[in-house]
Image (cartoon, rainbow, N blue to C red):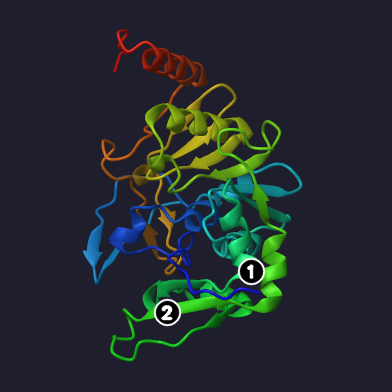
Amino acid sequence: MIFQDISCTRIGRYSSGERPQITQTHPIIQFLANEYYHGPLLKFDDENGTYCAKIPENSIAIPARINEFKDDKISVLDVGYSFGANLFLLQQLLQINSDKPVIVKGYDNDLTILKKPTQEKIVYNSLSCLLHPIVRNIIDRFFIEEKKDPGVSSHEQPVNFSLKENAKSELEKMLFYGNAMDLPEPDHASDATIGLYVLRYHDRITQLRIFRELIRVTKPGGYIFTEEFFFRREKNTVSGLSPSYEPAISFYDSKKALWYFSNDPERECIGAVQSIKELDKRIIELSDASQHPQKRAPV
């Protein structure tokens, strides 16, 4: 067994929020597992580093999106899962919010990364202020807390964790080899498909091909999460969602709403896509233009 410390910042990536820099990457657990409502636009204030607003008294809560999934189990695919321990949080936090079995599979095409979580000691980190008691309870089941830095305030205290030995075998069952452009999954396999921090490392054509594959494996009615955007997969279309119109009830405080918003669309690679057919056409146009530079594809 090789032991090597590797820093990874994915603890809490799916579940935490309420802070501007975290909220901008739309915590997935809160989006899927919390009640939400459709109502007037809210004024969100930055108070003590949080992005929350009180829910209007006449608002009606809508059941959590996880209840929309109709099959007898909920399937989640995480493409490009990094060092994998975040898959525990993803599975456990969705499971406690659903009466159906939640199956989580992580895919990566790097065999070295695939083996690291179970063969090496990897250090995952977060901040104390981002660890809700429910999150902390799950972490304590699967992780060992490393030594804290005594020179930092308790609220901003970095907290480091490494996997318990018995958790490594459980994690290994969730990890699979697969290329993001050709996943070994059938059409409509997943209720929620995640591809965070994957697209930005590729050229435009590859980005669109990966995104097309995320669409393929997602069930109609399911959700797709990319860098700064998320989408609803319909039968023949993909709708870019605007969460500012449907704020989710806070994971931390049920009397408040959390605003999930996207960053500057020019900074990221995929914006709203309305038609799968148009996406296919765009991929062909870009590919043709790259092979024949004199033919410039339309912007």
Q: How many marks?
A: 2
Rendered location of residue 99, percent (x, y): 71, 58
> In this rendering, does residue 95 appear at all?
yes
Rendered location of residue 42, percent (x, y): 29, 51
Residue identified by numbered label 2: 159
Please state which of the two labelled residues, at mark 2 or mark 1, is closer to the viewer: 1
Residue at image x 54%, y 61%? Answer: 83
Residue at image x 67%, y 72%? Answer: 167
State which quadrant residue 69 falls in. Answer: top right
Residue 205 shown left or right of residue 92 in the figure:
left
Rendered location of residue 199, percent (x, y): 43, 40
Determine whether 38 is above or below 159 in the image: above
The label number, if any, that marks residue 119 in the structure image: 1
Q: Which residue is farthest front?
A: 2
Query: Between residues 127 and 261, which one lies in front from this camera angle?
Result: 127
Going from N to C along the chain, the mark reached first, 2 or 1, is 1
SS for callout 1: helix
Residue 196 shown left or right of residue 223 in the figure:
left
Which quadrant is the C terminus positioned in? top left
Which quadrant is the N terminus positioned in? bottom right
Residue at image x 44%, y 72%? Answer: 125
Rendered location of residue 248, percent (x, y): 43, 54
Query: Between residues 218 and 45, which one lies in front from this camera angle?
Result: 218
